[in-house]
Image (cartoon, rainbow, N blue to C red):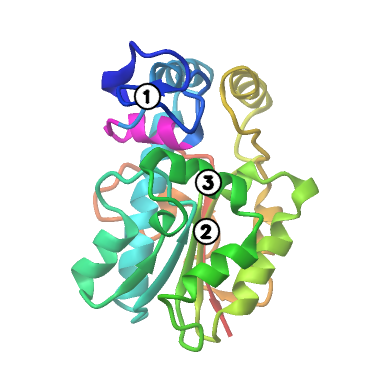
């Protein structure tokens, strides 16, 4: 956290932390870009290095957060969803899933990172590590959510840290197989086919040197596979900033993130 920078690796003001602060983490990098306080020197250094390799990185992070808000407003408003399973939500700043959904429908139930770990930064670590343990996630979610009724599952900017070897498609299939018909999936994912090769190589070098997670960006076709068997809501699978943008939105910059919302029949 920003005030703990004098502490050594893995240490905070109140003693050892349950994670390594000497290496950057995606969730804390997002937190820094979004103006949060739950980040460390390594996270900020990785962001600055990343911006040199990919100048639109911060825009992409903010665009992803804005996509979250628009998607949740659609789901809680137009679609009438009152249950959310928010997987890999990152470190809370403003405009979280529960804040957006409950501003529209106060009775909305949301299970997110707090379900998995009581420590803020540690929860992000825990979700990243245990997204593969879908039985654990679904079992704990069932304590609050009614799986016989439609819900929305959000997987935003998390599946690209799951390598092909861990079969992210099977993870999504299992989660969506457990929810009721009429449920929705909101997903964003780093795009391999929206980068030029030079930027891709430069950014990959930064990630490999400075960030805990390894990224697996995927093409539009590969991301579309996550929605197999679902009806994709208009405007379809598009860069996140193009998904139902607010009037007056900046349309001159590109996020390099695919995003979509799909409905389970």
Please say if 81 is above or below 211. below
Measured in 3D between alpha carbons, the distance from the residue under mark 2 to the one under mark 1, in whole angstroms, is 36 Å
Which quadrant is the N terminus positioned in?
top left
Residue depicted at x 60% and y 51%: 130
Give the residue number, with chain letter if any, for mark 1. 15
Residue 82 placement, left or right of 192: left
Give the residue number, with chain letter if any, for mark 2. 187
Residue depicted at x 20% and y 74%: 106
Q: Secondary structure at mark 2?
A: strand
Q: Secondary structure at mark 3?
A: helix
Precedes in sequence: disc 1 or disc 3: 1
Q: Main secondary structure of the magenta part?
A: helix
Which quadrant is the C terminus positioned in?
bottom right
Precedes in sequence: disc 3 or disc 2: 3
What is the span of residues highlighted in magenta in the rendered image? 27-37
Q: Secondary structure at mark 1?
A: strand
Q: Quadrant of residue 120?
A: top left
| Disc 1 crowd, CA 10 A, few/some/many (<14, 14-19, 20+) | few
């Amino acid at each position: 956290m920003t005030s703990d920078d004098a502490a050594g690796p893995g240490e905070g003001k109140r003693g050892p932390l349950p994670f390594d602060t000497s290496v950057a983490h995606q969730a804390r990098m997002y937190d820094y870009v979004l103006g949060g306080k739950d980040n460390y020197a390594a996270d900020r250094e990785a962001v600055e290095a990343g911006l040199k390799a990919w100048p639109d990185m911060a825009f992409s992070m903010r665009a992803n957060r804005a996509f979250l808000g628009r998607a949740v407003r659609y789901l809680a408003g137009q679609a009438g969803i009152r249950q959310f399973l928010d997987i890999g939500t990152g470190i809370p700043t403003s405009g979280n899933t529960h804040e957006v959904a409950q501003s529209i429908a106060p009775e909305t139930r949301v299970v997110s990172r707090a379900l998995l770990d009581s420590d803020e930064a540690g929860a992000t670590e825990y979700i990243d590590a245990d997204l593969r343990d879908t039985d654990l996630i679904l079992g704990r979610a069932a304590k609050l959510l009614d799986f016989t009724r439609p819900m929305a599952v959000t997987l935003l900017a998390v599946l690209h840290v799951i390598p092909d070897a861990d079969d992210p498609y099977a993870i999504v299939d299992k989660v969506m197989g457990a929810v009721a018909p009429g449920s929705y999936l909101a997903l964003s994912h780093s795009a391999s086919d929206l980068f030029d090769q030079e930027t891709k190589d430069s950014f990959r070098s930064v990630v490999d040197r400075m960030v805990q997670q390894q990224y697996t960006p995927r093409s539009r076709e590969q991301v579309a596979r996550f929605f197999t068997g679902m009806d994709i809501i208009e405007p379809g699978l598009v860069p996140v900033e193009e998904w139902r943008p607010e009037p007056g939105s900046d349309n001159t910059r590109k996020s390099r993130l695919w995003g979509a919302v799909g409905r389970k029949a």
